[in-house]
Image (spheres, grey):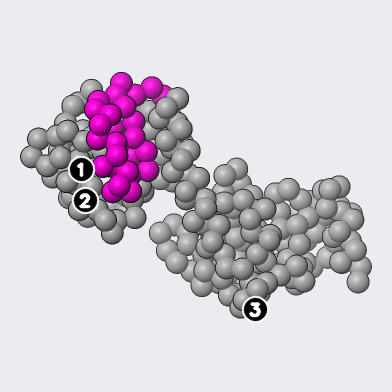
Amino acid sequence: MKYNCIIIDDEQQGRRLLENYCNKIDDLVVVGSYKSAIHAFEGMRTNDIDIIFLDIQMPELSGIDFLKSLKRNKAKVILTTAYREYALEGFELDAIDYLLKPIGFSRFLRAIEKVKEIHEKSTSNVVENIRESGKETIQIKSNKKQYKVSLIDILYIQSESEYISYITKTYGKLMVYGTLKNVIDTLPNTSFIRIHRSYIVNLSHIKYVEGNRVCIEDNFLPISETYRKTFFNIWDQ
């Protein structure tokens, strides 16, 4: 997943520093850099923003006043300022973190990790607990869209670094932030089984098993030693 970011700071040096930091992280994309909060409104109308780096003391419209206007906005706000005393008011307005200038890269990284942790917790609930609800569909939010996916439509689920991909017959590949561990606990174990640290498969879509791999839609997925016994106990029934 890519995180669209905007930077709001009346000092050019501050904007350039944050732009440089963002460019060092593959999944951060700077879609706007503004010297005033007023100018930022236009950019937010034309882009879906995930993270806002917001300076507090600015002319015309302060960062705090700008933040108050964003109560219903989904973007995560990271405050940047040289004045520690503004932190409390920012947190009361649901800012995620507070970076005190001069901002070091390691501290910047911790703020980004905090955003990702919050995102992971929220997306872990994207897949409803099917075992308890008995539902036959799940809600998956991917690439700014909300999909209602039938369980039978899911071919397999693949781990890709910090993300997981639902490979479906109808929608193709749907990528979300999360882990296979969170997903497998929500899916019915009569239909889905983990066969590898990187794969969960839908048993109903396995064409055949050949050695230590399964064939699903002409894709061959490995069965690791860790999950081999459990898989074959179910497959041989």
Q: Which residue is mark 3?
A: 134
Q: Is residue 6 visible?
A: no
- Residue span colored magenta: 77-105
The mark nearer the N terminus, 3 or 2, is 2
Mark 3 Cα within 10 Å, few/some/many (few <14, many 20+)? few
Mark 2–mark 1 Cα distance, whole angstroms, equals 6 Å
Mark 3–mark 2 Cα distance, whole angstroms, equals 41 Å
Is label 3 in a helix, a strand or a loop? loop
Q: Quadrant of residue 58?
A: top left
Percent position (x, y) of residue 154? 64, 67
Mark 1–mark 3 Cα distance, whole angstroms, equals 45 Å
Q: Is residue 215 left or right of residue 136?
A: right
Labelled disc at residue 68: 2
What residue do we see at 25% from left, 25% from top? 82
Rendered position, 70 above or below 155: above
Q: Which residue is mark 1?
A: 64
Q: Is residue 167 one of those drawn in magenta?
A: no
Q: Quadrant of residue 45?
A: bottom left
The answer to whether the residue labelled 2 contacts the one labelled 1, judged by CB atoms less than 8 Å apart, is yes
Residue type for callout 1: Ile
Which corner quadrant holds the C terminus? bottom right
Residue type for callout 2: Lys
